[in-house]
Amino acid sequence: FMLSAYNTFVAAQLLVFAVAIQGVNLLTGYSGQLSFGHGAFYAVGAYTVAILLSHFGLSYIVGLVVAAVLCLVIGLLFGLPALRLEGHYLALATFGLAIAVPQLLKLNAFQSWTGGVQGIILDKPDAPLGLPLNPDQWLYFVALLLTLVVFLTSWNLTRGRIGRALI
Protein backbone atom coordinates (compact mmCIF):
# COMPACT_ATOMS: atom_id res chain seq x y z
CA PHE A 1 0.00 0.00 0.00
CA MET A 2 3.02 2.27 -0.27
CA LEU A 3 2.63 2.76 -4.04
CA SER A 4 0.50 5.44 -5.62
CA ALA A 5 -2.77 4.41 -7.26
CA TYR A 6 -1.18 4.72 -10.70
CA ASN A 7 1.82 2.56 -9.81
CA THR A 8 -0.47 -0.04 -8.24
CA PHE A 9 -2.48 -0.14 -11.47
CA VAL A 10 0.75 -0.55 -13.49
CA ALA A 11 1.77 -3.43 -11.20
CA ALA A 12 -1.63 -5.07 -11.86
CA GLN A 13 -1.08 -4.68 -15.60
CA LEU A 14 2.34 -6.31 -15.27
CA LEU A 15 0.72 -9.30 -13.60
CA VAL A 16 -1.82 -9.56 -16.44
CA PHE A 17 1.03 -9.49 -18.98
CA ALA A 18 2.83 -12.17 -16.96
CA VAL A 19 -0.19 -14.45 -17.44
CA ALA A 20 -0.14 -13.82 -21.19
CA ILE A 21 3.61 -14.46 -21.33
CA GLN A 22 3.18 -17.71 -19.41
CA GLY A 23 0.90 -18.93 -22.21
CA VAL A 24 3.57 -18.11 -24.78
CA ASN A 25 6.15 -19.85 -22.57
CA LEU A 26 4.11 -23.04 -22.45
CA LEU A 27 3.67 -23.16 -26.20
CA THR A 28 7.03 -21.91 -27.40
CA GLY A 29 9.30 -22.75 -24.50
CA TYR A 30 8.08 -26.26 -23.76
CA SER A 31 6.72 -27.53 -27.06
CA GLY A 32 8.99 -25.54 -29.36
CA GLN A 33 6.10 -24.32 -31.53
CA LEU A 34 6.23 -20.73 -32.74
CA SER A 35 2.93 -18.86 -32.39
CA PHE A 36 2.02 -15.24 -32.99
CA GLY A 37 -1.68 -15.60 -32.18
CA HIS A 38 -1.61 -15.04 -28.43
CA GLY A 39 -2.31 -11.33 -28.82
CA ALA A 40 -5.47 -12.17 -30.76
CA PHE A 41 -6.80 -14.34 -27.95
CA TYR A 42 -5.80 -11.66 -25.44
CA ALA A 43 -7.83 -9.13 -27.47
CA VAL A 44 -10.85 -11.43 -27.77
CA GLY A 45 -10.85 -12.03 -24.02
CA ALA A 46 -10.42 -8.36 -23.16
CA TYR A 47 -13.11 -7.19 -25.56
CA THR A 48 -15.49 -9.92 -24.39
CA VAL A 49 -15.21 -8.75 -20.79
CA ALA A 50 -15.52 -5.09 -21.81
CA ILE A 51 -18.59 -5.70 -23.98
CA LEU A 52 -20.32 -7.80 -21.31
CA LEU A 53 -19.69 -5.10 -18.72
CA SER A 54 -20.50 -2.04 -20.79
CA HIS A 55 -23.44 -3.33 -22.85
CA PHE A 56 -24.97 -6.02 -20.66
CA GLY A 57 -24.08 -4.82 -17.17
CA LEU A 58 -22.67 -8.16 -16.07
CA SER A 59 -20.16 -8.44 -13.24
CA TYR A 60 -16.41 -8.71 -13.76
CA ILE A 61 -16.37 -12.28 -12.49
CA VAL A 62 -19.04 -13.42 -14.95
CA GLY A 63 -17.25 -11.52 -17.71
CA LEU A 64 -13.94 -13.24 -16.96
CA VAL A 65 -15.54 -16.69 -16.96
CA VAL A 66 -17.43 -16.05 -20.22
CA ALA A 67 -14.27 -14.62 -21.84
CA ALA A 68 -12.24 -17.66 -20.79
CA VAL A 69 -14.84 -20.04 -22.21
CA LEU A 70 -15.12 -18.04 -25.45
CA CYS A 71 -11.33 -18.00 -25.91
CA LEU A 72 -11.27 -21.74 -25.23
CA VAL A 73 -13.92 -22.35 -27.91
CA ILE A 74 -12.20 -20.08 -30.45
CA GLY A 75 -8.86 -21.69 -29.62
CA LEU A 76 -10.33 -25.13 -30.25
CA LEU A 77 -11.95 -24.01 -33.50
CA PHE A 78 -8.64 -22.56 -34.67
CA GLY A 79 -6.43 -25.19 -33.09
CA LEU A 80 -8.10 -28.37 -34.33
CA PRO A 81 -7.44 -27.62 -38.02
CA ALA A 82 -3.96 -26.31 -37.10
CA LEU A 83 -3.01 -29.56 -35.34
CA ARG A 84 -1.39 -30.81 -38.52
CA LEU A 85 0.73 -27.67 -38.85
CA GLU A 86 4.15 -27.26 -37.33
CA GLY A 87 7.15 -25.04 -37.70
CA HIS A 88 6.81 -22.04 -39.97
CA TYR A 89 3.39 -23.19 -41.22
CA LEU A 90 1.93 -22.87 -37.71
CA ALA A 91 3.72 -19.54 -37.30
CA LEU A 92 2.14 -18.25 -40.53
CA ALA A 93 -1.34 -19.44 -39.56
CA THR A 94 -1.14 -17.79 -36.15
CA PHE A 95 0.33 -14.67 -37.73
CA GLY A 96 -2.77 -14.49 -39.93
CA LEU A 97 -4.93 -14.70 -36.81
CA ALA A 98 -2.89 -11.94 -35.15
CA ILE A 99 -3.41 -9.69 -38.20
CA ALA A 100 -7.11 -10.48 -38.71
CA VAL A 101 -8.50 -10.05 -35.19
CA PRO A 102 -7.56 -6.37 -34.66
CA GLN A 103 -8.95 -5.54 -38.10
CA LEU A 104 -12.20 -7.32 -37.29
CA LEU A 105 -12.52 -5.47 -33.99
CA LYS A 106 -12.23 -2.12 -35.82
CA LEU A 107 -14.79 -2.89 -38.55
CA ASN A 108 -17.65 -0.41 -38.88
CA ALA A 109 -20.13 -3.27 -38.46
CA PHE A 110 -18.80 -3.94 -34.94
CA GLN A 111 -18.02 -0.34 -33.98
CA SER A 112 -21.10 0.04 -31.78
CA TRP A 113 -19.89 -2.97 -29.76
CA THR A 114 -16.11 -2.52 -29.74
CA GLY A 115 -15.80 1.25 -29.91
CA GLY A 116 -13.83 0.99 -33.16
CA VAL A 117 -10.38 2.53 -32.99
CA GLN A 118 -11.26 4.28 -29.71
CA GLY A 119 -11.91 1.04 -27.85
CA ILE A 120 -14.12 0.71 -24.77
CA ILE A 121 -13.63 2.74 -21.62
CA LEU A 122 -14.66 1.08 -18.37
CA ASP A 123 -14.77 2.28 -14.80
CA LYS A 124 -12.52 0.43 -12.39
CA PRO A 125 -14.42 -1.95 -10.11
CA ASP A 126 -14.87 -1.15 -6.45
CA ALA A 127 -13.75 -3.69 -3.90
CA PRO A 128 -16.60 -5.96 -2.81
CA LEU A 129 -17.88 -6.55 0.71
CA GLY A 130 -16.74 -3.14 1.90
CA LEU A 131 -13.06 -4.06 1.81
CA PRO A 132 -10.89 -1.01 2.57
CA LEU A 133 -9.20 -1.04 -0.85
CA ASN A 134 -9.26 1.51 -3.63
CA PRO A 135 -10.09 0.21 -7.13
CA ASP A 136 -6.41 -0.01 -8.15
CA GLN A 137 -5.52 -2.07 -5.10
CA TRP A 138 -8.50 -4.35 -5.71
CA LEU A 139 -7.44 -4.90 -9.34
CA TYR A 140 -3.91 -5.64 -8.16
CA PHE A 141 -5.06 -8.33 -5.72
CA VAL A 142 -7.38 -9.94 -8.29
CA ALA A 143 -4.56 -9.94 -10.87
CA LEU A 144 -2.15 -11.36 -8.27
CA LEU A 145 -4.55 -14.17 -7.37
CA LEU A 146 -5.17 -15.08 -11.03
CA THR A 147 -1.45 -14.91 -11.79
CA LEU A 148 -0.67 -17.26 -8.91
CA VAL A 149 -3.37 -19.69 -10.10
CA VAL A 150 -2.02 -19.64 -13.67
CA PHE A 151 1.60 -20.08 -12.61
CA LEU A 152 0.81 -22.89 -10.15
CA THR A 153 -1.33 -24.64 -12.76
CA SER A 154 1.43 -24.28 -15.36
CA TRP A 155 4.02 -25.56 -12.90
CA ASN A 156 1.89 -28.62 -12.12
CA LEU A 157 1.11 -29.15 -15.81
CA THR A 158 4.75 -29.13 -16.89
CA ARG A 159 5.82 -31.50 -14.11
CA GLY A 160 3.42 -34.27 -15.16
CA ARG A 161 2.66 -36.47 -18.13
CA ILE A 162 1.29 -33.58 -20.18
CA GLY A 163 4.44 -31.55 -19.58
CA ARG A 164 6.65 -34.43 -20.71
CA ALA A 165 4.49 -34.78 -23.84
CA LEU A 166 4.87 -31.04 -24.55
CA ILE A 167 8.63 -31.27 -24.24
Image: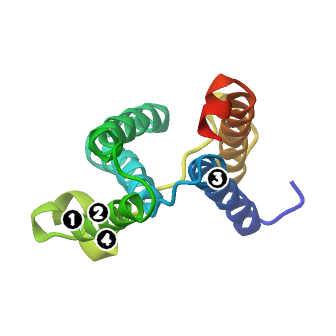
Q: Nearer the viewer, mark 1 or mark 3?
A: 3
Q: Amino acid at mark 1?
A: Leu
Q: Amino acid at mark 3?
A: Asn
Q: In which quadrant of the rendered view does residue 63 lie?
A: top left
- Residue under pointer 1: 104
Task: Determine contact: label 2, label 3, CB under 8 Å.
Answer: no
Q: Which element carries disc 4, helix, strand or loop?
A: helix
- Residue under pointer 3: 25
Q: In which quadrant of the rendered view does residue 86 lie?
A: bottom left
Q: Amino acid at mark 4?
A: Ile
Q: Residues within 10 Å of mark 2 (few under 14, many from 20)?
A: some
Task: Determine contact: label 4, label 2, CB under 8 Å.
Answer: yes
Give how far across and how far down residue 144 sits, in percent: 73, 44
Q: Which element carries disc 3, helix, strand or loop?
A: helix
User: What separation in Å lies between label 3 and label 4 (alpha carbons)?
Assistant: 21 Å
- Residue under pointer 4: 99
Residue in the image at 64% along x and 60% along y = 13
Q: How many marks?
A: 4
Q: In the image, is 63 to the left or to the right of 166?
A: left
Residue in the image at 74% along x and 35% along y = 155
User: What separation in Å lies between label 4 and label 1 (alpha carbons)?
Assistant: 9 Å
Q: In which quadrant of the rendered view does residue 132 lie?
A: top right
- The residue furthest right is 2
In this rendering, is residue 8 above or below 76?
Answer: below
Q: Amino acid at mark 2?
A: Val
Q: Nearer the viewer, mark 2 or mark 3?
A: 3
36 or 145, nearer to the observer: 36
User: Of marks 2 and 3, which one's residue comes earlier in the chain?
Assistant: 3
In this rendering, is residue 108 above or below 137?
Answer: below
Task: Determine contact: label 1, label 2, CB under 8 Å.
Answer: yes
User: What separation in Å lies between label 1 and label 2 (alpha carbons)?
Assistant: 5 Å
- Residue under pointer 2: 101
